[in-house]
Image (cartoon, coloured by chain):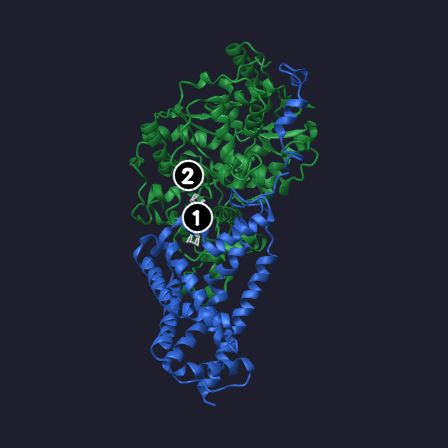
Amino acid sequence: MSAWTIGYAVLLYVAFTVLVGGVVYKIGIYAMTPAPLRIPTMPAPRTRSGVAMRLGREVALFASLFRGDKWAWIWSYLFHVSLLLVLIQHLRYVLVPVPQWLVFESPFGSYAAFVLLISLAGLLGRRLMIARVRFVTAPSDYLILVLLLLIAATGALMRFVDRANIVGFKAFIQGVMALHLEPLPLSPLILVHVASVAGLMVIFPFSKLLHAPGVFFSPTRNQVDSSRLEAQGAGDASAADVSAQPQAHAPAMREGAR
Amino acid sequence: MSDIEVPVLQDYVPTPELKPGAMSHLKPFKASPEHQAALGFPGTLVDDWQEVAIRRLGELVDGSRALRVYLDSCVKCGACTDKCHYFLGTGDPRNMPVARQDLLRKVYRRYYTWAGRWFPWLVGATDLTEEVLDSWYSYYHQCSQCRRCSVFCPFGIDTAEISMAAREILDSVGVGQKYCNEILGKVHKIGNNLGLPEPALRNTLEGLEEDVKDATGVDVRFPVDVVGAEVLLITPSADFFAEPHIDGLIGYAKVFHQAGISWTLSSQASEAANFAMFIGSREQMQKVAQRVRDAAIALKVKRIVVGECGHAWRVAYAFWSTLIGPLDFLDPRYPRPQHICEVTEGLIARGALKLDMSANDDKVVTFHDSCNVARATRMGDRPGGQFTVPRSVIRSVCAHFVDMDPATIGDRTFCCGGGGGLLTDDLMELRVKGALPRMQALNAVVQDNKVTHMAAICAICKTQFSKVLPSYGLPREMVISVHQLVGDAIVLGAKD
Ligand code: SF4
Ligand code: SF4
């Protein structure tokens, strides 16, 4: 068993633990932090199911971003959708035997790699070219994009150019999962790909990547518009106004006077 | 105002070139030690301010999920960067919402996150230096907490929450803003923002009764402290004496009079405004709100109605239940609390008011959605009622109504430029420049649709517009209260 194999296996165990542990910890903190005041951005849904719809639109369609910035929406939507397809395709390293639906998904997941690359280039390009965005960019923002580009590029190369090590790599992953190590094929592409994926997993719970769980905990988006006591019954205050009140110049008015 | 460079109105508001530091000189006057002490804040910068500020920041984050999630989640996508009227008006990149958040975020990251502690240069984390504190004072007082940015943020990050927290931290180390803190002191001592004592208030209201009698021949009352009245009206104190607010108050009185609803003001809670929201102090906000609950109970009223005031309606609608609730001692047949526009709309819908629209025939009216009403509250039963209810009221009393550019109304409305505790002369440059997007949209309907008036339902908006309209070559009298239109159209005593 080579030192590479052991080193990379350990790396994956550590990265996985940090990712899952960190995100679970953060979610726990988010859930436990009180949100005493009602601050939904209005107009907000008046029911829980309405809020679920609102969050669904944010997560599935990036609805607010769409209203805010069309180009940012295009690039980030393409990025997230292609990333999702690629990730699903990677399930073939985990699920044995590969289920039928995954076989069907695979071409989509494979070619999504190109969309992934293009959208990452778009995201990086606008970060560099739009002065407003550049102004608020920290080195870590570039670092995350560069990591993702590395991951996507090496992944695409392995899928479409240098396919020789895929079978061996699958065996390695299976071994890692079974706690029974198989040798890691020593291809530079694999080494870079896996190391950068592990890097991204490790920084996830310490970085802006927390936006993924964060969106579900955002009070402006997940609160129900229910903070005032609404009129009971038909809620028709005006009907009550008229029936409960006498005519004009009413005695009630007079009583109200000093 | 002469030395302020007023932006030129164009066909649209261009996204400005970045002018770093363009507004860093602007700082509102600091609160005096007495004003600070009255609110329980240190009078001057405390010696161990760094420690105090960092500790307070931690406490605030521990107590607010919003703050915690927002400080973690921003991906620097830039969608919010061109949404703030202060950025559009000044070009200062620190007035881009995300950059404004970052002033606090970089300190939070430095002291409270692993990445910021070990790799500050990588994640843009910085120590809390005097310079940073200074930039907080400057730029967190260039945010009107209008929440326009939060509408477009993919995670709903609300810069208002962050600027409120920053102001609370500043107060806790002894650097308060004069305008807000002085006013809060007056509310505690005298009962309203203007410092109008009870005798003066009664006097003013008596004068108003006479004015209305002279103008209409009808005894419309403006009652104070009437025990057992049906409605307690909580309204901004500007309504008691300043134009154009006062015509709104006359409008409310005519509505109540004509509908036969007994109502009263309270001398103890003669103020709807709650500036504690602006300085982010929940404790102060609770204290100010408590006056309303106490007054309602003492006066044995059945309903609380809130007058035309944006942030007050936010506090009432969204926060009262938490701060002073539940208001379950009030009549359950009505929303608790209720907005004056809801009352009027309901009455109009029931035909309880006789209206003569021709009274407003000389006007072509547009409506300014006030940010707090638009993005933090509702009226009526349906989401979005905060947009339709006031418009429906205006349309029932005025034949000529035109909306401004849809991108500048509704939940995308632009702040007047004076909200969030910035309505002070020492921030006039910011107020003039920040009004640009609204002025632009208004000017467009003035040119294209011959709009003569802009109605509003917020005391801050009305004051701000009266002040800045002339800078843009528009008459200050353009801005009016929605209930002035109502009051002018009501035919008193004519109900059958
Ligand atoms: S809340 Fe309003 S004033 Fe403050 S940063 Fe956002 S858009 Fe600007
Ligand atoms: S829109 Fe939201 S996530 Fe994007 S930069 Fe602004 S605050 Fe950050």
Q: Between residues B328 and B199, which one lies in front from this camera angle?
A: B328
Q: What element carries label 1?
A: helix
Q: Quadrant of residue A165?
A: bottom left
CA distance separating discs 2 and 1: 13 Å
Q: Going by the picture, which residue comes out furthest to the bottom?
A: A1
Chain ID, mark 2? B
In blue, which chain? Answer: A
Residue A96 is left or right of residue B12, and the answer is: right
| Residue B306 seen in render | yes
**Residue B224 vertical placement versus B437 (above, below):** above
Q: What residue type is labelled 1?
A: Phe
Q: Colour of chain B?
A: green
Q: Mark 2 points at which residue?
A: B414
Residue at 62% x, 15% y is A248
Lower position in the chain sequence, tag 2 or tag 1: 1
Q: Where is residue B369 in the image (x, y as percent from the top left)?
A: 46, 34
Q: Where is residue B110 in the image (x, y as percent from the top left)?
A: 47, 61
Which quadrant: the C terminus of chain B?
top right
Q: Is mark 1 within 8 Å of ligand 2?
A: yes
Q: What residue type is labelled 2?
A: Phe
Residue at 61% x, 42% y is A227
Chain ID, mark 1? B
**Residue B77 vertical placement versus B40 (above, below):** below
Q: Quadrant of residue A144?
A: bottom left
Mark 2 neighbour class, 10 Å CA radius: few under 14, some 14 to 19, many 20 or more: many
| Residue B274 seen in render | no
Q: Mark 1 points at which residue?
A: B152
Q: Position of residue A247 (x, y in %)?
A: 64, 16
**Residue B173 vertical placement versus A103 (above, below):** above
* Foreground: disc 2 or disc 1: 1
